[in-house]
Image (cartoon, rainbow, N blue to C red):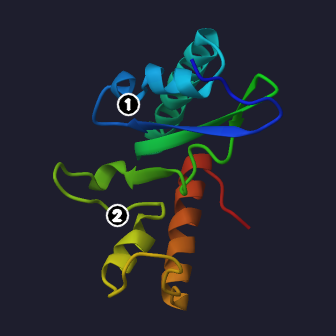
Amino acid sequence: MKTAPQNQLNVLRIKHVRSGSVREVFDLGKTLLFVATNEMAECVSDLSLQIYAAGPDHATQHAIIVADTKFEFGVVDEKLLLIDEWLAPDSSRFWPAGLYAVGQSPPSFDKQFVRDYLETLDWNETPPGPRLTGDVIARTAAKYVEGCERLTGEKLK
């Protein structure tokens, strides 16, 4: 079994998708290649499932669907860390519950708007990417703010 090097941050990304079983997305074998022990792999699984259950439950109370998300874990000195943003618009897809329809891509409160814009451009999808227009930036920011305000029940100042 491969173990995580000492004093080095290694990142494991776990993706959860609403439409299927969360367990299907979590691959214990791949996790064992990343972390030092079977116990730590189980901890990653348990934490992922707990976070994933809590986030969508909260979002549902505010008429938002968490369509998918990812968590990134790191290991430093054999300690497991939850790193980077989680359940955020850059790592998740948030849909307004009232506008969801099977087979359609609903409006969202996340970076999907930017992705959709980039798909309309003629570029080879290799870095550096095209510059975003002021309008795309402003509309994306407005989507992030609206999602945040819905989830927190508070207006941003």
Of residue 108 and residue 132, the one placed in the foreground of this image is: 132
Marks 2 and 1, the one that precedes in the sequence: 1
Report whether 80 appears left or right of 107. right
Q: How many marks?
A: 2
Residue 125 picture location, percent across and down: 40, 76
Splitting the image into 4 quarters, where does residue 77 fall?
top right
Q: Residue at x 77, y 22 (%)?
A: 78
Q: Quadrant of the N terminus?
A: top right
Tag 2: residue type? Pro
Where 84 falls versus 80 (above or below)? below
The residue to which callout 1 is attached is 25
Indicate the secondary structure of the residue bearing disc 1: helix
Residue 137 picture location, percent across and down: 55, 81
Indicate the secondary structure of the residue bearing disc 2: loop
Tell me the CA gap for discs 2 and 1.
25 Å
The residue to which callout 2 is attached is 107
Where 99 falls versus 24 (above or below)? below
Quick one: which residue is furthest to the left in this view?
Answer: 103
Q: Residue at x 51, y 42 (%)?
A: 70
Of residue 124 and residue 71, the one placed in the foreground of this image is: 124
